[in-house]
Amino acid sequence: MKLSFNTWCYSSFPAWLPAYPIDYVVTHLAKIGYEGVELGCASPVAYPPYMSAEDRRKARRLLEENSIEVSSVLPAPGGGCGNNVASPIAEERRTAVRNYKDCVDLAADLGGKICLYVAGWVIYGVDQDQAWEWSKECLLEIAAHAKKRSVVMAIEPTPSDSNLIETPDDALKLMRETRLDNVKVMFDTIHALYRKDIAADYVDKMGPDLAHIHVSDLDRMPPGTYTDFTFLVDALKANGYDGYLAMEIGLSGRGVDPNVFAKKALQYMRSIL
Amino acid sequence: MKLSFNTWCYSSFPAWLPAYPIDYVVTHLAKIGYEGVELGCASPVAYPPYMSAEDRRKARRLLEENSIEVSSVLPAPGGGCGNNVASPIAEERRTAVRNYKDCVDLAADLGGKICLYVAGWVIYGVDQDQAWEWSKECLLEIAAHAKKRSVVMAIEPTPSDSNLIETPDDALKLMRETRLDNVKVMFDTIHALYRKDIAADYVDKMGPDLAHIHVSDLDRMPPGTYTDFTFLVDALKANGYDGYLAMEIGLSGRGVDPNVFAKKALQYMRSIL
Amino acid sequence: MKLSFNTWCYSSFPAWLPAYPIDYVVTHLAKIGYEGVELGCASPVAYPPYMSAEDRRKARRLLEENSIEVSSVLPAPGGGCGNNVASPIAEERRTAVRNYKDCVDLAADLGGKICLYVAGWVIYGVDQDQAWEWSKECLLEIAAHAKKRSVVMAIEPTPSDSNLIETPDDALKLMRETRLDNVKVMFDTIHALYRKDIAADYVDKMGPDLAHIHVSDLDRMPPGTYTDFTFLVDALKANGYDGYLAMEIGLSGRGVDPNVFAKKALQYMRSIL
Amino acid sequence: MKLSFNTWCYSSFPAWLPAYPIDYVVTHLAKIGYEGVELGCASPVAYPPYMSAEDRRKARRLLEENSIEVSSVLPAPGGGCGNNVASPIAEERRTAVRNYKDCVDLAADLGGKICLYVAGWVIYGVDQDQAWEWSKECLLEIAAHAKKRSVVMAIEPTPSDSNLIETPDDALKLMRETRLDNVKVMFDTIHALYRKDIAADYVDKMGPDLAHIHVSDLDRMPPGTYTDFTFLVDALKANGYDGYLAMEIGLSGRGVDPNVFAKKALQYMRSIL
């Protein structure tokens, strides 16, 4: 198992500040000791439409020089454009698909192998089955593109924020319906905690289809702040999991020092791995 | 003075849920008793690229039938694309300008006269004076476009979220540097509270250049929850202000019922006007 | 890098009690292990108009005997006379300038090389640009005097208390406008925390113009109480900083034991330096 | 009984901001409904050395035009100069006496009849009896001057901040020792609350020597926030008290809106008088 750190708290999403360019982020995370970086695809760190071929070559060199790799990528949900793949607005779904493809391409260009899939949410007036179908259609199109770039799509249940894919079973069901071998599942411990579920149980449920994990304590604090994650680690070992544990933390607003969060999370995780 | 309600908490920004289409929002705000609606330009309520000419005609009819007008519009800052007009990334500034122009056009198409201007923020490695210049350049281009559509740009100090335009004096200075008569200033009471400043004093400072106001109590709660706004109203009367008071509240996350917030705010504001 | 301790919490400002004479303060700080003492120029520790030439000779001897030096000085802002260098009351600005010159002289008489500059605040009815000009005029006069005594003036951003010099960029801008080589900048970590900024980033921004640092955790608690300062220390090392880290803590009122605060701060700082 | 409001929270002491000139303060307090204003002698409201004869004539006219009178005055304790009348530093006692005489003169020039006396505090190394003697000497000199200007000195026990005059009995003792008929006593409810004493009992104890009262709830909040002051009012009526009740509140720092505090306090006090 390897440790990665998600870059939202270094970017202008969801809090505008503090915000850093990708060079700062990569060099600092490598120095702190991470083996991977999870690119939250938001400016100024890594918004695909702003990154030219030359920018990507430089970023790839930067990663190599610092011996750190892209563990995974994911787009920023919300914002003006919504990015809701289950939206009744067809143009929004098209925009979301385009954004996902851009993220897949960025991952591939930088050597990344996994793109997370937030399956959208049901807005007022929409039938849940219809929302599910729209989300699935989007996923099929995105995954077909991802396949060409050798990227795996990992569906994430997000019950604290949404209302469509809430459980490991929901994620597995959507995965199976796609019948695609580059669609897998993942989970974030904060969503398990939100549902008062046991994160370790998700590992058993997802088994060999578990492609990625987000680790976060309550309130997006570093793991170990409130919660004991040793049973999660035990379950992962028993399951033979050899992917990344990506810290997706520090999203509570301006005032979070990303380096401090990264360091605290690393120290705790190393102490229990 | 007229009362308006901002639509962020009805949209998928910043929280994804609950989320409503524009028909729902307009009819409910009108029924609650608002004279104006402030369009936060986010899906599914009102993201300009998703709204066709036909959509806009329908929206305009809807507003007329419900006797409610568009008091103002503003784009969603942050998200993947950042929308930071003071970003060192030229493509981000271009994107932000395009988004602002889209919002101006939406305002004009629906009969609105004011577009708010969030002047961006200084990211790591950027000089504050340089950020100011970039923001001013963007504003000049947007305001020139707004001029053609008879829309006023109102610069908003946003100290709780950013680090460039923090005070009424900053906003007035940027306004004066543009030398354009359709650039004015506005303020949000929550930012005055954040700075521990007195909102009523902002009215005296901004005087005839005050084009709009956001009213919010601490934590984006309805006005009157914690704070007494009577001195603000007194200062506005003394200043001869006849614009809108727009409630920009309920942004603290999923769980906020937009209709309940809208009703509480209206009741309090009417009791002190 | 050397460690110093600010004497406010040993003086009658801002809390009247506990209060100690200078002999007590110097001997105790030396014994605790500090290499420097930062004189907050308030009675009964060190109010310049109360200190005769003989008092100063004795104080100098005392410092030498205890192998501790004056790292820096600063006047007490507020009080009846205000000491606001940006006040619209001309007599107040004259008083403030006189107080600053007294502090500079005290520094020089005791072997100190740095005087901090709190650049004042904008009261109701004053234009921010005018306040800035008044503050600059005062600084020019004070700095000319300081030059003769070989004292450097270090401008401090104080956003939690004031509204004129709030950011490192503000301080650098004021510094540059003076065009004087004995005007530099400094910062206090508590003000960076107040702004939810990252203190380490201030080091990069201020670079070679950084002349001094105040270290304080939130609520003026000893560093390490809530916040991890290791990244600040890393940034200072990378910047080649060789000045003082002065603990300006324990200002929250009567009940603070200055010696206990001094000892805790020293232990933490030594553990990360 | 008449209601007055203390101006600290409109001045730069103890918090620097917000701060207002005297014209603003007088007109706003009169409009809110106060019959008196208690001048905390701090800039920019009313620092005597900054107020010329012409300034005083204008202030007197302002008071008359707004039908509000100066109920009382008091100097700012602390600050660089300490103003401790029990200080072992002779120059500090001389400075404090001069400040008190300045305040007495300001009171007289503006038609005020009462100056409060904070009797100082015992610093490290000083004997309490010696401190008492120094304070008494100062008081005798100040009171002799006040006599000529027809001003009464009112001694205030200040146990929450100091350690010399802590109880009504202490204040009465010091009063009696002066054998001067223009030396009286007063108390502040917050100090009674601090000692967990009953404010109403202080009225009985001080009887005809009670010349003034400060009303404040805990944490310097408006009366009525936490505490029921009806028994205090009953005791005052029974005692035939016909002086001022001065609200000395809102000292907890920047962020207090003085007008809101003034209004809340007035509404509560009127409801129980």
Image (tube, coloured by chain):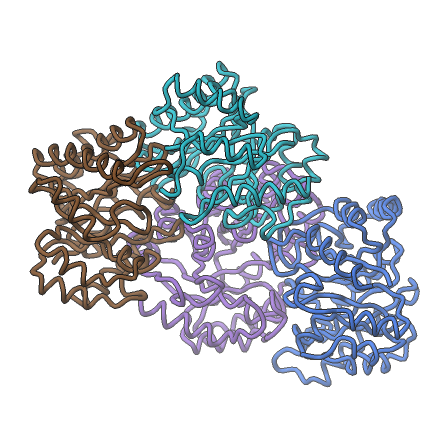
Chain colours: A blue, B purple, C cyan, D brown
The residue at 10%/56% (across/down) is D207
Q: Nearer the viewer, residue D176 or D30?
A: D176
The residue at 62%/51% (across/down) is A17
Q: Is residue A230 left or right of residue D105?
A: right
The residue at 60%/65% (across/down) is B14
At which x and y percent is residue A75? 75, 62
At which x and y percent is residue D201? 18, 62
The answer to whether residue B144 is seen in the rendering is no
- Quarter holding the N terminus of chain A? bottom right
Q: Quadrant of residue D96?
A: top left
Residue C66 higher or lower than A11, as above or below: above
Number of numbered markers:
0
Q: Is residue B18 left or right of residue C18?
A: right
Q: Nearer the viewer, residue A204 or C111?
A: C111
Q: Quadrant of residue B225?
A: bottom left
Residue found at the far top of this picture: C148
Q: Is residue C211 left or right of residue A144?
A: left
- Quarter holding the C terminus of chain A? bottom right
At which x and y percent is residue D59? 18, 38
Q: Is residue B121 left or right of residue C38?
A: right
At which x and y percent is residue A127? 68, 85
The residue at 13%/55% (across/down) is D206
Residue A13 higher or lower than A184, as above or below: above
The answer to whether residue C81 is seen in the rendering is yes
